Amino acid sequence: MKPRIYVESSVISYAASRKSPNAKTAYRQEVTQMWWSKAVDQFALESSAIVQFEIAAGDATAALKRLKLFASLVCIPLHEELASLSERLLLEGLVPRSEPEDASHIAQATLTQVDYIATWNFAHMVGPQAKYRLVQGIERWGYKAPLLATPEEILEGLMS
């Protein structure tokens, strides 16, 4: 059985967008596209209606590109405890109250027991302090925390 990865909105956005003039963004786009081409064979790539809603917003042409990528993923049904765990993440300060979608991604991935969350969201998910707080809180509540990782981190494991 392949490891399961919940693909968060930022990954789809980087994979589908035209090359940015910003060097850091362009690098992440390139890494994401390389990761995507390798990950489809080695992982079960999944997402949710939360991601679909987020990536459908904005410029219509860009949204269509993002939605086309989304269509290649397995869309897992929203878990019945999603609202409850999302709210707990927000109330406990593990995710800022201003970022309810981020809490929903983390809750959905946790409740559906995926192995990884692939994201470029350093502020609330894969930054060292954020990752530490999330894993500690999720496991303290009795859940198995998914591994929060950037496509670059996951790609390094594929290349070694």
Image: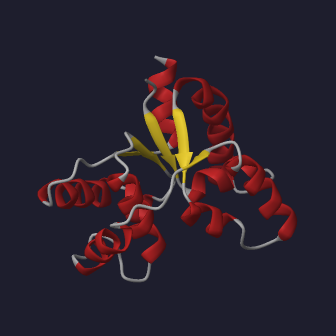
Task: Identify the residue at horizontal 27%, vertical 49% (top origin).
Answer: 145
Residue 17, located in which quarter of the rendered image? Answer: bottom right
Residue 154 coordinates in the image, percent (x, y): 47, 34
Residue 106 is left or right of residue 84, and the answer is: right
Residue 160 coordinates in the image, percent (x, y): 46, 16
Task: Identify the residue at horizontal 40%, vertical 42% (top origin).
Answer: 116
Q: Is residue 150 visible from the viewing direction of this image? A: yes
Above or below 146: residue 95: below
Residue 40 is left or right of residue 67, and the answer is: left
Front residue of 149/101: it is 101
Task: Identify the residue at horizontal 40%, vertical 61% (top origin).
Answer: 79
Residue 59 is left or right of residue 56, and the answer is: right
Residue 134, located in which quarter of the rendered image? Answer: bottom left
Task: Identify the residue at horizontal 60%, vertical 34% (top origin).
Answer: 35
Residue 156 coordinates in the image, percent (x, y): 48, 27
Residue 11 coordinates in the image, percent (x, y): 59, 51
Above or below 1: residue 92: below
Q: Is residue 20 visible from the viewing direction of this image? A: no
Residue 61 is left or right of residue 130, and the answer is: right
The mark total stands at 0
